[in-house]
Image (cartoon, rainbow, N blue to C red):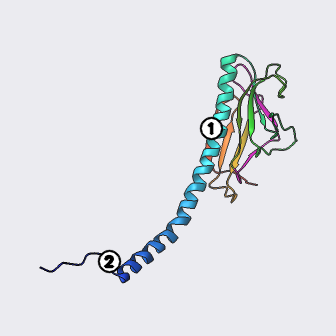
Amino acid sequence: MMKTQTGVTLIEMMIALAVLAFLITVAIPGFQELFRGNRVVTQANQVLHGLALARSEAVKRSAPITICKNNGASPPGCNNANNNVWESGWIIFADANGNGAYDAGEEILVEDATAAGYSVRTTNNYQTIQFLPNGTPNFSDTFKVCRPDADTQKSRSVTINAIGRASVTEGTTACP
């Protein structure tokens, strides 16, 4: 009785590796685009969540809650630079005295950051947005969440209206 050989030949193995290399070369750019798209959606949802949390906490506590640009220091505080750049992230705090600035002893509810390479900018140059006890903000504004490639079609806008409701839409008018 003869034994049959099992396995693959060197030529079959090389053809399989060539096909695999081709598929990887074609698939990697698609996966990179998928990851960039998911990251910008995640970043926009973080902004949306922060705004919704601040609004609900203001109503729940019947007290002002403020979101401000993070100064990146430890302990955190508000960045009062007169610009629309929120890349260093933001803090949400219970603004006990309602002055719109973080003071020692005020409770920080959330400290959040922006993903590296992504930008978060406001349409206006507001350094803070304060939610009043009835859930309305002191300003309505739009946060532009942009990808590193500044593609306005695939970026997101998070808009907060005059009654405090925030929503996300695809696309922005401009990215830095």
Q: How many marks?
A: 2
Which residue matches tag 1? 167
Which residue matches tag 2? 8
Q: Is residue 25 above or below residue 43?
A: below
- Disc 1 crowd rating (10 Å Cα; few below 14, some 14-19, many 20+) is some
Residue drawn at x 67%, y 20% as measured from the top left: 59
Rendering quarter of residue 112? top right
Rendering quarter of residue 88? top right
Q: Is residue 145 magenta?
A: no
Q: Residue 115, percent across and down?
A: 68, 48
Q: Is residue 111 above or below residue 84?
A: above
Q: Residue 11, percent across and down?
A: 37, 83
Identify the secondary structure beneath mark 1.
strand
In three-dimensional space, the C-alpha distance between marks 1 and 2, rounded to whole angstroms, equals 57 Å
Of 89 and 157, nearer the camera is: 89
For marks 1 and 2 on the same chain, the one whose residue lies earlier in the sequence = 2
Residue drawn at x 75%, y 22% as measured from the top left: 64
Q: Is residue 128 magenta?
A: yes
Q: Residue 94, percent across and down?
A: 75, 23
Q: The residue under label 1 is which amino acid type?
A: Ser
Query: Position of 32 compared to 163: left or right?
Result: left
> On the rendered image, what quadrant is the N terminus found in?
bottom left
Of 22 and 60, nearer the camera is: 22
Prevailing SS of the magenta stretch: loop
Please identify, in this view, whether the residue under mark 1 or under mark 2 is nearer the observer.
Answer: 2
Boundaries of the magenta span: 116-139
Q: Is residue 52 above or below residue 38?
A: above
Q: The residue under label 2 is which amino acid type?
A: Val
Query: Position of 35 compared to 95: left or right?
Result: left
Of 15 and 62, nearer the camera is: 15
> On the rendered image, what quadrant is the C terminus found in?
bottom right
